[in-house]
Structures are given as C-alpha cells and as structure tokens.
Amino acid sequence: MKYYIKTFGCQMNEHDSQILAGILDNYTDASGAPSSEKNEMTTDIKQADIIVVNTCCIRESAETKILGYLGSLKKYKTANPHVILVVCGCMAQESGAKERIKKRAPHIDIIFGTFNLPKLQDYIRTFRQNQQFIYDIEETPGLEHAVLPVHQDIQSFKGKVNIIYGCNNFCAYCIVPYVRGRERSRSMQHILNEVRAIAAAGGKEVMLLGQNVNSYGKDFPDGGSHHFATLLEEVSKVEGIERIRYMSAHPKDFHVELIDTIAALPKVCKHFHLPLQSGCNQTLKDMNRGYTTEQFWHILEAIRKKIPECAITTDMIVGFPSELERDFQETLEFVDKCAFDDAYTFLYSPRTGTVAAKREHQIPDEVKNQRLQQLLAIQNKHSLANNQKLIGSVQMVLVEGRSKTEASVWTGRTDTNKIVNVPAIEGDRDYTGLFVPTKIVGAKTWYLKGEFIR
Ligand code: 5AD
Ligand code: SF4
C-alpha cells in the first residue's frame, strides 16, 4: 500500500511523522512478523491508499486550517472508497476533538492521540477487517521506553531525536501539557542509539527534541538537573555528527553552568532559542512563566559574555489577557534592549481548557494586530542589524540544497542557524549535505547572502 503523510505544526510533529512513516514501512502481520505486504511512502496524495494527517492545536488558526484540510480529503475517499483516512497528533488528543472532526469531516476513519503512535499498524489492520470508525486517545504507559522505527528523511544529513516527551510547566496560555502529558525522559542509551543510527546513515546534524529540554532526566531516579548537560557531552562523542541542536529550552531552567558546557562543546551549535513570551513582569507572572525580565536579562548577558559570536532567538505572544498598553510598552522596550537575532511572534489565541482562556479582559483582535506590527518593527530592525554585523566574515555553512523559490541559488545554515543563500555557478558540484566555508557578502532581515569559498 502507498501512504501519504501530511504534517502540521512543530518539529516534534515532524519527527512523530517520521516515526509514523517508520511504523508503516515496517508493516507486520497480526503476529508481529514482517508482512509480505510492503508499504511505501508517496508524495502524491492521489496515489495514496492510506492518508495520515498529523495535527497541531497550539493556536486556533492551526485548527481552522486543519479542519478545512480534513474536509477536503473527502474527494479522495469518493474517488477510491478503499482509501483509509487517519487523523492523529495534538488536535486529535484534545477533548471534544472527535466531535469537531467528525462534524466537519465525517469521512475520517481513524482518530488517535499523541500517546498511541505505536498502535498505528493495529488500527489500520483492524479497520481493514471491519471498516468501523476507530477513536483512541488513551494514554499508552511507557511510550518513552519504546524503541520505534524512524523513517529516514530525504534530507538524511539532518536527523531528529526525541529526548523528553510532555511538559510540566502549565504556562497559562498553553495547551501542550494537556495534549502531550507530563514530562517523561527517554533513556540516554535509546537516545544515543538513535543518534548513532543517524550518523551511520550519513547524518551530520542532530536536533534533540523536547518541550523543555532542560528538564531532561529530572524524572530519573537521582532527579538531578545535570542530565541535559551530560547528554550534550555524550552526543558530542558520536563520530560523524558535527552539529548538535536542541529545541526548546525554557529560560527558567537555563542555568549558567549549562552555558559553560555548551561553550566547551564545539559541536553544540551556538544558537540559543529562549522563548521570552513577554517583556513585562506582570504579564510573565500572569502567564506563569517562572522568571522575571531581570532573570532573563542575566542569562542573555551570561551567554553573550561567554559566547560573543552566538545568536539568540525568541518566541513572543502579544495580546495576552489583561496585557495593558503600558505592559506592552514595557515589552517593546525590553525586546529592543535584548536585540534578538530573530523572534517568532504570535497573537494570543485562547485555547479551551487553559487557565488564560477563562480570564476576563481578553484583548480585541485589532489591538493584538496593532501590537504585533509594533513588535515586528522593532524586531526586524535588530534582525537586520545583527545580520549586517556578519558581512565580511567567513561562516561554515551546512548546505541544504537548492532554494525552493530560486533554483539557481544554494541555501544552507550557519552554526547559529542563520539562512545563507549563495548563487550557484556553472559546473558547481552538488554541495547538498556538505559544510562549505562561505564569505558573507550581504544581509537581509531574514537571511544572509554569501559566496562559497570554492
Ligand atoms: N497563543 C499564541 N501563541 C501561543 N504559543 C503557545 N500557545 C499559544 C497561544 N495559546 C506560542 C508560544 C510558544 C510557541 C511554540 O507558540 O510563544 O513558545
Ligand atoms: Fe507550553 Fe509553557 Fe510547556 Fe512550552 S513550557 S510547552 S509554552 S506549557
């Protein structure tokens, strides 16, 4: 059978989709023995016998888009009644999701949640036998100990590995703890085995994934907070892996000792993504973020002092309930002071079940939009200025391939995760997956322009 996977949302979901593909690639019969029937991934949805939609629910806009997409799948089932339509991921795990999905897309055959990845084969087998709708969001205990197959990406020089599932933080706006459960760390051995497998397949860069990677290992018997640093040291020892990234780190758990560890490990990228969310202490408190702007500033200073060549990026939410104009002005001033390399900026979106959604003083959409524009103006100024500082320098770029929008341009990333675009010249070899020293010759807000030192 051919399968097609559509992924919405974050890197965690992208990686879950690689696991879902791995499960489908290794299709077994009911006894668990390899099946004579082989599955194959297709990028042409019209060819697919199984369509899997891995969903996101972080903001309402994601859900609206996904519900529209699910509605549009009907035509494939009409054209080909044996097609199996599967919905999984964060939105599937939400309470009330079954009803909302079925209302908009009654043709969906299987809905399962974020805890049930390993059961995908069973669902498909059962559905093929009795053609009855399946819904399962029960928590599968011990998922963090499961060794699941991972479908190698086309970009096999980059791999992702889950290190910790779930989140314990309950930021007032965030639905993640409700749909991904509490923190569960994977064993270091499992993680290292996966990193070695990525390296053996030609991987050069690995991304360690978790909602809050700094919590890695806090649920181990000794409960220490040093496990993430130890993990970085261990992953650094894997031959073939040249770059180590991680996503996401929480400012409240980002200790100065970790900066020392990162500074001492050449393979760990000098890019720090530290979601600030708000630059006003009252709003941070309302958000239940667990740090003040002063504490955040202290981390930023420590990082920049120790690693001056680093890049620091952030996430920001505007229009959180009760965010006064004066609070927002504080945010603007603080963001200006922080001079981030980039910021992912979001309009606050109320999520049913979270504390903030129940609060009075929700901010009108037009105010949120105005605030977003003001924030972007300040951030864009810093993004450009930080990029301009690199003009004239030579950066090691890991080339990802030709640009999707311009075939005559190579595109890749620096250690600090900045995009570098380089015009291709006739007779160029295929640089995809190679590290190429690159002279930076220009800077835009979102990317750098470079020339390979060929
Ligand atoms: N509304 C807007 N943005 C949100 N984020 C998380 N929840 C919400 C929400 N309800 C943002 C945060 C987080 C990023 C992944 O998404 O900034 O860091
Ligand atoms: Fe959501 Fe906060 Fe957990 Fe991040 S740390 S996933 S924003 S609850």
Image: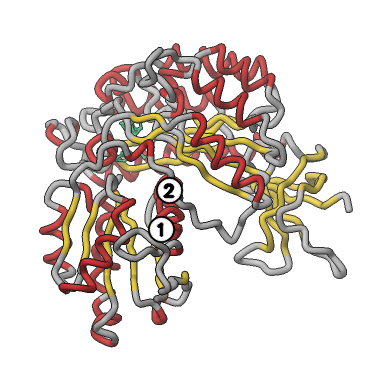
Image height check: is 88 above or below 234? below
Residue 189, position in %: x, y?
Answer: 51, 32
SS type, badge 2 = loop
Residue at coordinates 20% horizontally, 73% vertically from top-left?
129
Relative placement, left or right, of 216 versus 159 is: left
Image height check: is 305 above or below 240? above
> How far apart are the alpha carbons under marks 1 and 2?
7 Å
Residue 111, position in %: x, y?
Answer: 21, 59
SS type, badge 1 = helix
Mark 1 nearby-residue class (10 Å; few <14, some 14–19, many ≥20) = many
Please name the residue that numbered disc 1 is placed on: 23
Residue at coordinates 18% horizontally, 69% vertically from top-left?
105
Residue 331, picture quadrant: top left
- Foreground of the two, 269 or 209: 209
Please name the residue that numbered disc 2 is placed on: 148
**Quarter holding ligand 1:** top left
Residue 396, picture quadrant: top right
Q: Amino acid at mark 2?
A: Leu
> Upstream in the sequence, badge 1 or badge 2?
1
Residue 80, position in %: x, y?
Answer: 28, 85
